[in-house]
Image: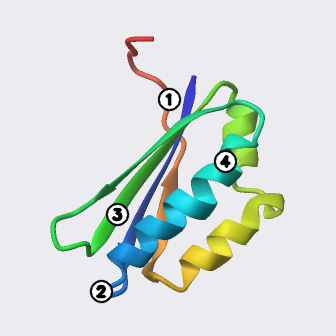
Amino acid sequence: MFARNVSIRLKPNSSAAFTKQIENETIPTLRKQKGFQGEITLLAPGGGEAVGGCAWTWLRAAIAAGSTSRAAPRRIVRVLISRKRILSLPAPGSSTT
């Protein structure tokens, strides 16, 4: 299993719109992708920052999740972001699955 992690800073007062977009657009899009296992999004108190992580069956699927074919949800979220996202594909350390 592989993870794709993203850390972003949100524009002021945009946490509700960000959460709605993640639930209504991003997660349904991810669920259609081959190899997608799950997603979690965490918001800092006050909603100024968000951290998200997606689990993928294959490394190739995790890398492909950032391709231009999946850019539509990112374009929607981009209007809510005040700082460029930080993306990482960490190697697995340990797992309960």
Which residue is denoted by mark 1 in the rendering?
91
Per the model, the C-alpha gap separating discs 4 and 2 is 25 Å
Q: Contact (CB < 8 A) between labels 2 and 3? A: no
Which residue is denoted by mark 4 in the rendering?
30
State which mark lies toward you, 2 or 3. Answer: 2
Q: Residue furthest left?
A: 45
Q: Position of residue 19 (x, y in %)?
A: 42, 66
Per the model, the C-alpha gap separating discs 1 and 2 is 34 Å
For label 4, count other residues whose C-alpha is less than 10 Å away and answer few (under 14), some (14-19) or many (20+).
some
Lower sequence index among marks 4 and 3: 4
**As drawn, 8 above or below 63:** below
Q: Where the N terminus falls, by quadrant? A: top right
Secondary structure under tag 4 reads helix
| Colouring rule applied to residues | rainbow
Which residue is denoted by mark 2 in the rendering?
13
**As drawn, 69 above or below 55:** below
Identify the residue shown where x is 75% and y is 34%. 60
Task: Identify which residue, 37 or 63, lies in the foreground.
Answer: 37
Secondary structure under tag 3 reads strand
Which residue is denoted by mark 3 in the rendering?
50
**As drawn, 27 above or below 43:** above
For label 3, count other residues whose C-alpha is less than 10 Å away and answer few (under 14), some (14-19) or many (20+).
many
State which mark lies toward you, 1 or 2. Answer: 2
